[in-house]
Image: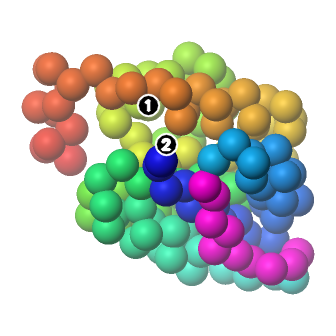
């Protein structure tokens, strides 16, 4: 079973809790915080999650903030992390097929709850194509 980690900041807290409620019976998902909607700094939670994902090939992460952008930028500072800001089925599939993304970032203020669940399902079930894409990913 895959290890899935999830974290947010205050702006993504409600969507994070919703995601956990939808997936906790289906996948092994570990909540890395925060524990409430009090204001926090998103880079702290992105870094915490990125370190967990980078430890073992096959680990995945879900990061949620207001736009998803800050989390993606912060997480991508960690070696062996490829965080993708996802907002459509097509860009989510491509993030896995071509980039072997291991963290999906989502913007609570920009997508609906149902879309977030759909994108996570796509992200977790889409396999990396490898081939010419592997050569490129190794250059990151």
Q: Position of residue 80 (x, y in %)?
A: 27, 57
Residue range in magenta is 28-37
Within 10 Å of disc 2 (Cα), the crowding (few <14, some 14-19, many 20+) is: many
Q: Is residue 133 magenta?
A: no
Please tell me whether residue 85 is drawn above or below residue 40 in the rendered image: above
Residue corresponding to mark 1? 95
Secondary structure found at label 1: helix
Please tell me whether residue 78 is drawn above or below residue 110 in the rendered image: below
Please tell me whether residue 106 is drawn above or below residue 97 in the rendered image: below
Secondary structure found at label 2: strand
Q: Residue shown at 39%/26% (left/top)?
A: 127
Q: Residue shown at 86%/39% (left/top)?
A: 113
Residue 115 at least partly seen: yes
Residue 82 at least partly seen: no
Q: Residue shown at 57%/61% (left/top)?
A: 5
Residue corresponding to mark 2? 84
Magenta span: helix, strand or loop, mainly?
Answer: loop
Q: Position of residue 124 (x, y in %)?
A: 53, 35
Q: Marks 1 and 2, how far apart in space?
A: 6 Å
Foreground residue among 131 and 86: 131
């Amino acid at each position: 079973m895959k290890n899935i980690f999830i974290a947010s900041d205050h702006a993504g807290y409600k969507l994070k809790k919703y995601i956990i409620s939808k997936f906790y019976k289906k996948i092994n998902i570990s909540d890395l915080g925060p524990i409430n909607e009090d204001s926090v700094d998103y880079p702290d939670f992105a870094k915490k999650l990125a370190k967990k994902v980078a430890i073992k090939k096959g680990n995945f992460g879900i990061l949620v903030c207001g736009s998803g952008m800050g989390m993606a930028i912060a997480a991508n500072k960690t070696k062996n992390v490829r965080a993708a800001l996802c907002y459509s089925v097509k860009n989510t599939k491509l993030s896995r097929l071509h980039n072997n993304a291991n963290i999906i970032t989502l913007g609570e203020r920009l997508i609906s709850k149902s879309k977030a669940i759909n994108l996570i399902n796509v992200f977790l079930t889409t396999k990396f194509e490898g081939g010419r894409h592997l050569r490129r990913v190794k250059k990151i």
